[in-house]
Amino acid sequence: MEFAELIKTPRVDGVILHRPFMPTVEGTLCLTGHHLILSSRQDNTEELWLLHSNIDCIEKRFLGSQGRIIVKCKDLRVIQLDIPGMEECLNIASSIEALSTLDILSLMYPFFYRPMFEVLEDGWNSFLPQNAFKDLETMTDEWRLSEVNKDFSVCASYPPLVAVPKGVDDDTLRKVATFRHGGRFPVLSYYHKKNGMVMMRAGQPLAGTNGRRCKEDEKLINATLRPGKRGYIIDTRAANVAQQAKARGGGFESEANYPQWRRISKAIERSNILQESLIKLVEALNDQSHNMDRWLSKLEASNWLTHVKEILTTACLAAQCIDREGASVLVHGTEGTDSTLQVTSLAQIILDPACRTIRGFQGLVEREWLQAGHPFHQRCAQSAFSNSKPRQEAPVFLLFLDCVWQIVRQFPCSFEFSDSFLVLVFEHAYASQFGTFLGNGTAERVKLSLPQKTVSLWSWVNRPQELQRLTNPLYEANSLVIWPSVAPQSLLLWEGVFLRWNRSSRCQDEAYEEMVHIIEYNKELQSKVNKLRRQLAQLETEDRLLQTP
């Protein structure tokens, strides 16, 4: 298919662009296969380059012979284009709708993008499972890296290499895979260096109404327990939902078959509920009535912060079981690709200081989201504005990032990355020139040859100038476990994502720049103090030598 077939009018002059907190710009609108571009001959005006994949929906309005297109983006931005001529407006709108709803992965922009920067590090090779396993080997010899899924035949959503207990062979893993939803047998998610406890993740057991049993599954998860120790199974479904799953062939681990494990139900809502929540939240944010009661009522009705609280609470529970109870944990919901990953990744943020660095966080996203099979292409196909009926879209990853931001806000000196880094990751998950978040899992990325044909987001982020921009100036490495508050009063709306297009950030930007200036000045003064102390110590030494007879 040629992109030109979808572009009815490639160029229109005299288009007026309206953007939040930016001056109005008049210029030429151009449509390419992947971008909506507006350029102006006016001095000191910034061009608009908008990826079609970032467009959630458009609205058309007509004022006499002039048309107006409201473009609503997946990053929650809303822009307005005033287009002279009704026919041109209709053609542009039709072309944008066709280009922004293309669902063929191989036609996405990352396959056509050529970087204008020097690639110092290939991000596709920065966080391979075998490299992460080398770090694990320095701490324990109780695990091995299995190639049982090297051709993706055992589990379509797992990577080719997974960490499993050393005493469990590949034949056992194949049998366990037939007993777990989607073939997602229990694999290592995290090893807690402090006490040797582990966190695993999996899909639900396929127990069904007959209470089907799998002794290989029992053997696998019991292999992670120390003698005399009990473990915890954290089920991210409500108890009644887990019970109902039995009728559809799913279910949960029975106490009779897993006597050394205590099962805890912690309800995290399913994807369709989360998508409705995001839509309601963004509706509330764009309400122009300026009525306080109405705003608070709509914010509460969206239940967004309730979902944040539920996820954080469950992650804290998992971390508590590992660190304070000294017990190993298995986390699963139904598929094991959504709420399960929210819990396992947030628990690692709480427990592991390495995950609070820029590079460590990238590794966490790779291990616990990209390699672990979160279906990014399905979940991020729509954001909050789309008029089409949601299919499998859900802000699962956005909620995870929101939870991370809540922890960062409570521990502002314990994270190497700033709010800008989390916002950047959110934006690229929904629309990007990089191939990192394309596809629904490792199998699909391998099939599309993404590492060979596209550039990794991490190649861009890990350049010195970009790292400097994304680094938190207040960062001081903290080796301790951090325990965030999940009290309702402690949880706030993430302004960096939800309010940045609704109000100007000029005052906050100025305050941030002043803070950075103060920190740099403090470092200079500290350096001078250290230098003077060394000089003083040297003078005192020389003085003692002179006084010695």
Image: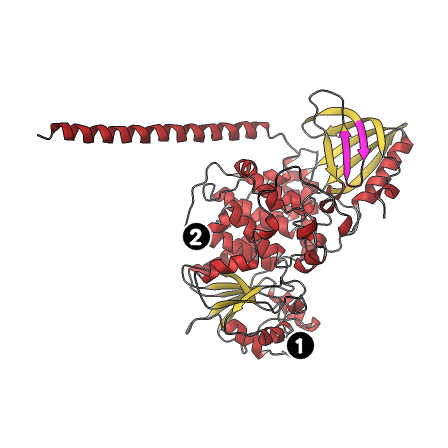
In the displayed structure, 36 sits above or below 378; it is above
Q: Main secondary structure of the magenta part?
A: strand
Tell whether label 2 touches label 1 (CB within 8 Å): no
Q: Could you say which is closer to the camera, residue 506 or residue 168?
A: 168
**Where does label 1 land, which residue?**
209
Report helix, strand or loop for mark 1: loop
Report helix, strand or loop for mark 2: loop
In the displayed structure, 259 sits above or below 146; it is below
Which region of the structure is painted magenta?
A: 28-38
Residue 493 in view of the camera: no
Q: Is residue 168 left or right of residue 454?
A: left
Residue 370 is marked as: none
Which amino acid type corresponds to the residue marked 1 in the rendered image?
Thr
Q: Could you say which is closer to the camera, residue 253 or residue 456?
A: 456
Circle 2 crowding by C-alpha within 10 Å: few under 14, some 14–19, many from 20: some
**Where does label 2 land, which residue?**
481
Residue 94 in view of the camera: yes
